[in-house]
Image (tube, rainbow, N blue to C red):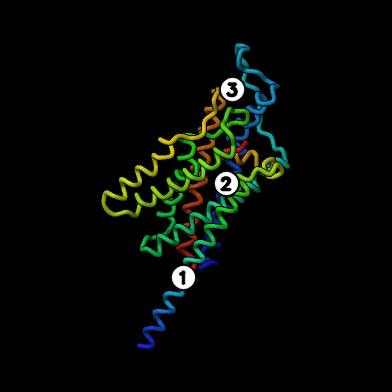
Amino acid sequence: MTTQTTAKTLGQSAVRTEIAAIFTVALIGLGIVFVAGHAQASALHDAAHDVRHATGFPCH
Amino acid sequence: MFQKLLTSALFAGFVAGLAAAALQLVFVQPTLLRSELFESGALVHFGSGSTPVPDMPFAIDPVRDALSVLFSALIYSGYGMMLVALMALAQARGAQINARTGLIWGIAGFVAVQFAPAFSLPPELPGNAAAEVGARQVWWFATLAVTAAGLWLLAFGKGWVPVATAVVLILAPHAFGAPEHADYVGPVPPELAGLFAARALGVGLMAWAILGTLAGYIWSREEPA
């Protein structure tokens, strides 16, 4: 009984860690795409200009 | 888990980004450089009869092209992280992730990120008329999100309710309409704009196919962690 409960608790916390990892990675990815592809700071815009056009991002 | 996600995403993203940059420099850049001649006014097309196609031999501009390679690798690494995160979620719900299913994931990613937005906001050449950039970005991200959700429902939904919901989600941004410019003012010849849009989408499809296949392959080979 106690072993079962412990295993279940462990399982739940592992799933929670996995979901946290998945969301963290997705958010970092979204952040990179936003900064590299969409942020309007002019230095960023000029550096990424050709790629932004070629990937079909709204550029300017 | 975190490490496995990052390994698959960054390696696949970096390779896909390099491939995208190489394809872009060979196939897309010449149309961009030609359009800049019209954007700057060095060449004029409309109202002047006809303009001979400007000669544009393949040439490397070191700083400009290195920045393109860098940003291409960055952006596809970002895409890779989002793609692999969704793959991991699907696997936790019983889906198989490998190189073959990865290819389908990659094509679906291309549809969500490039094709669906381009359906109403076609890839723009420099100098094209376009609505205010902030409004277009909001529409772009919203279209990406609802298209991805729709594709997920098509792939994993059971019964007709998810399919019907997916159709509504995928069509909604286009029925609602993208932010539009009020006038046609683009100085660039339509022949050039058409070639550019087709090339941009084609390069995107190739890069996403590589991204999905590689991400699926590496994901299936990595030890669970």
Instruction: Provide the secondary structure element on which disc 2 rests.
Output: helix
Nearer the observer, disc 3 or disc 2? 3
On screen, residue B214 above or below A44: below
Residue B94, percent from left and from top: 36, 63
Instruction: Provide the secondary structure element on which disc 3 rests.
Output: loop
On screen, residue A24 above or below A54: below
Instruction: Provide the secondary structure element on which disc 1 rests.
Output: helix
- Seen in the image, is B156 located left or right of residue B65? left
Kindly give the residue lying farthest to the bottom in the view shown.
Answer: A2
Q: Are marks 2 and 1 on the same chain?
A: no
Tell me, for residue A16, which label it has, or none.
Answer: 1
Near mark 1 (Cα within 10 A), the count class, few <14, some 14-19 or many ≥20, is few
Tell me, for residue B19, which label it has, or none.
Answer: 2
The type of residue carrying mark 1 is Arg
Q: Are marks 3 and 1 on the same chain?
A: no
Q: Where, by quadrant of the figure, is residue B128 drawn?
A: top right
The type of residue carrying mark 3 is Val
Near mark 2 (Cα within 10 A), the count class, few <14, some 14-19 or many ≥20, is many
Chain of residue at mark 2:
B
> For mark 3, what is the residue?
B185
Chain of residue at mark 3:
B
Tell me if residue A56 can be seen: no
On screen, residue B168 above or below B187: below
The type of residue carrying mark 2 is Ala
Residue A24, percent from left and from top: 54, 62
